[in-house]
Image (cartoon, rainbow, N blue to C red):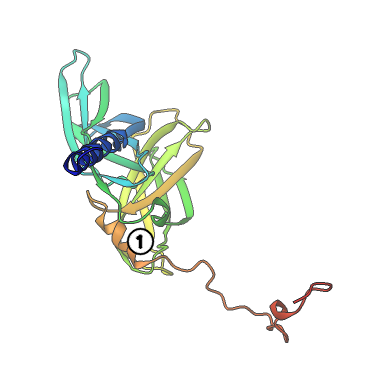
Amino acid sequence: MIPRSRTVSLLALGAICLAGCSSEDQPTQSLKPLVLKEQVSNIAKSSDGYAVNWAGVLSNANPWHFGEHVVATIVGRDAAGTEVVRMDQPLDAVPPGGSLAFTGQASTAEKPVKVTIQYRPAQWRPAARIASAFQRFPISRVQTLRQKDGSYLITGYVGNPYQLPASSLVVNALLRDETGKLLAGGSTFVDDVKAGSPPRFILTVAGLPKGAKVDRTEVTARTWGSTGRPYEELAMGGALPVHTVKPTTEPFAVDRGSEAMPGVKQ
């Protein structure tokens, strides 16, 4: 017979071993880094030197986390490899399981022949809602008009699918050719976007290379800010109901749900 004190010691040791094994077996959650899916840059002559325009798309494969405090670094070098322009561009938060389009522009006295876009790793924060709660802001009545100087004027309307008003939204327009290749992009802001009253946006995309043929315009809108808090506040306030029109048909005289099926005993 095993003494009681020894039995208690053995049970305690077994519990410690099981706890250690269970903690080792639990997989640690690994977050995937943001991916720069697309990038493009264009260089055009300007009155004070050269204008460098760029556009890119960042993708977030993590369905439960916001990618926050992201900074893109744009570097332009001349034919000798000398850096002639550098700019750090703070980006807005990348939503869970979503993507972020961004554009920008810088001026330089010397002409760069190569422009690269890199970014600092994001700071990850768990989202307060599931990914499906972060709905897209609907874009409607988009028009793309080519101007005499080769630039493109883009207009349209941006809606709000949430009950709370959006204080500030960033609207991005990406121009693509018939193969879907990214050609250029531009951005603008709209403020105080309320449900049912979509404001109009107007922006210009310039600096496209000669011979570029724009086939379609891809417009998206997002909340402004380096964190996902503004987006979360809208989602936590609730989305608008899908069906808001009162039915026009008369109700049934008898509730059919209460009728017995033929041949079925109640």
Question: Where residue 38 sits: x, y (%)?
Answer: 37, 31
Question: Where residue 222 sits: x, y (%)?
Answer: 34, 52
Question: Where residue 208 sits: x, y (%)?
Answer: 37, 33
At x 20% / y 41%, what residue is drawn?
12
Q: Choose between 5 and 68: the one closer to the eye.
A: 5
Q: Is residue 50 left or right of residue 253?
A: left
Residue to which mark 1 is pinned? 235
Q: Quadrant of the N terminus?
A: top left
Task: Tell me the crowding category of disc 1: few under 14, some 14 to 19, or many 20 or more residues within 10 angstroms, Cα based.
Answer: many
The image quadrant that residue 51 belongs to is top left
Can you say whether 142 is above or below 263 in the image? above
The image quadrant that residue 62 belongs to is top left
Query: In the current view of this chain or complex, which residue is farthest to the bottom?
Result: 253
Can you say whether 82 is above or below 59 in the image? above
Can you say whether 189 is above or below 208 in the image? below
Question: Where residue 258 sits: x, y (%)?
Answer: 70, 80
Q: Amino acid at mark 1?
A: Ala
At x 26% / y 32%, what residue is drawn?
52
